[in-house]
Amino acid sequence: MGQTRNADFKTKAKTVSQKWIKSKFPGVRFREHATRKYGVKFDRYFTIRYKLDGKTKEEGLGWASEGWSEGKVSEVLGELKQASRIGNGKTTLQERRLEDEVKKDEKRRDSLTFSQFFLVTYFPNSLIHKKESSNRREKGFFRKYLEPEIGNSRLKDISPLCLERVVKRMKNTSQSPRSIQYCLAVIRQIFNFAIHTANFEGSNPATKVRKPKFDNRRMRFLSFAEAENLLNAVKVRSINTHDICLLSLYCGLRAGEIFSLTWDCINLDADRIHIRDTKSNRDRFVGLPKQAKEMLTIRKIEARSKLVFTTRDGSKISRVSNSFLEAMKEIGLNDGVTDPKDKVVFHSLRHTYASWLVQGGVDLYTVKELMGHSSIIMTERYSHESPDRLQRAAEIFSLLG
C-alpha cells in the first residue's frame, strides 16, 4: 500500500516542474506542466507571494488553461495589497474565496424552491429518522396539497397567506380538521429544518397560520361486561389477537408499544412492564394485574422470539389483526353509532383502562404516569369518570367547619 502511494506521488510530481519561474510582475511566479501545453507553451500554474503582517504568504490561483495570465494574477495581487494598505476588503485569496462561497450559497438559497428542499434535503432526512407510516403520510401530503400550491414557490417567498391556500385546498377535498392540523405540523417541521440547515432565514410562516379547532377525544369506554364479551369473541378467532387486546385493556398499552414489546421488558416476579420507545419518547413502567400476568406467564413458556408477540412467520406485527374487527362486528358494539368519537376501536381498550382506573379512585397524576401522557391536560379527559369527585371536594369544607 505504501509503495503504491509513493508511486502515485512520484507520478504527479513528474507532471509539474519543480522549478519556480519568476514572471515580469513582482510577486508573481509559476511552474510549468511537464507535458500538457496551452497554446504553443507548456501550461503554467500561477502563484503569488506577498507580505502580510510581517509574514511571507504564498497562495495559488490556477492554470493558464483555466484563464489565468501573469497580468491577471498581478491585478489580483495588487488588489490584495491595496486592501491591506487601506484596511478595507479581503487581504488574502482564502478570504476572497470564502466570500465567493458565501455569495454562491446565498444565491442558491434565494432560488431554492419548496419542492427542491423537500425532495433533496428534508425528506431524505425523514426517511432515516421517522417511522415508515409517518414518511408515507408526509409524502402523501406533499404530493396532494403542498406541491400543487407551494411546490414551485421559493422558500423565502412563502408566507402564511400561501399556507392558507394549502388549508383551503384540503378543506375543498373534505379533509378532516385533524388532517389539516397534522399537515400544518409537517409544514412547520419542514421550515424548522430549513432554518436549522441554514436554507431559510426569518420566522417560521407555519406558526402564523390558525389551526382548525376540533375535539377528537374518544369518550366511549367499555363496561366490564362489554370488555368480557369482546375478549371472548376475539379469542374464538385468534389467541394472539386476544392476548394483545387483553394487554391493552389491563395495562393501557398502545398497539405500537405492544408490537415492540420484548421479553426483557417484562418482570413477572415484580409484576411490572418496562415500556420503551413510547410515543412521548419517555420510558414508563406499568403494573401487571393477574389477568395479564397469567397470560404472559403462559406465553413465555412457549416463547420462540425476543418479541412477546409476532406474526405466524415470527416477524414483527405491524397492525391490529382483522380478527379484532370481525369480533367487533359480531357483537355489534358500533351498531347505530354515527359519531366517530363514540365508536369503539382498538385504542378504546387503552381508553377503557384509564377510565376504569379513575372509576376505581386512582388519582389523575398516577393515571398520567401509567398512560405515559406528556401533559396532565391529556389525562383530564378522564376526570368525569370519577362519580363522587364533586362530593369528596365538598366534604373537605365540611371537615374544615
Image: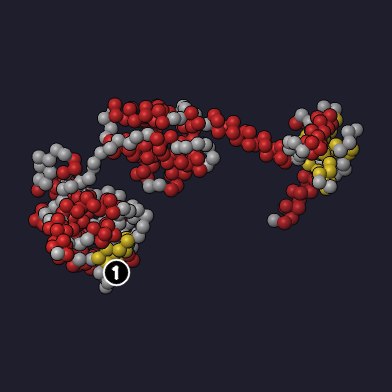
Residue 2 is situated, as x and y percent measured from the top left of the image, at 72, 56
Q: For the N terminus, give its image quadrant.
A: bottom right
Image position of 263 with respect to 67: above or below: below
Q: Which residue is at a point 57% across and 32% down the rendered structure image? A: 108
Q: Which residue is at a point 54% across and 29% down the rendered structure image? A: 111
Image position of 265 with respect to 211: above or below: below
| Residue position marked by numbered label 1 in the rendering | 267
Judging depth in this view, the residue of 173 and 358 nearest the camera is 358
- Local secondary structure at mark 1: strand
Task: Using a 10 Å C-alpha cutoff, classify the residue at mark 1 as few (fewer than 14 neighbours), some (14 to 19) or many (20 or more).
Answer: some
Q: Which residue is at a point 43% across and 48% down the rendered structure image? A: 129
Q: Which residue is at a point 45% across and 47% down the rendered structure image? A: 128
Q: Which amino acid does label 1 sit on?
A: Asn
- The image quadrant that residue 94 belongs to is top right
Judging depth in this view, the residue of 379 and 243 nearest the camera is 379
On the picture, is 156 further left or further right than 223?
A: right
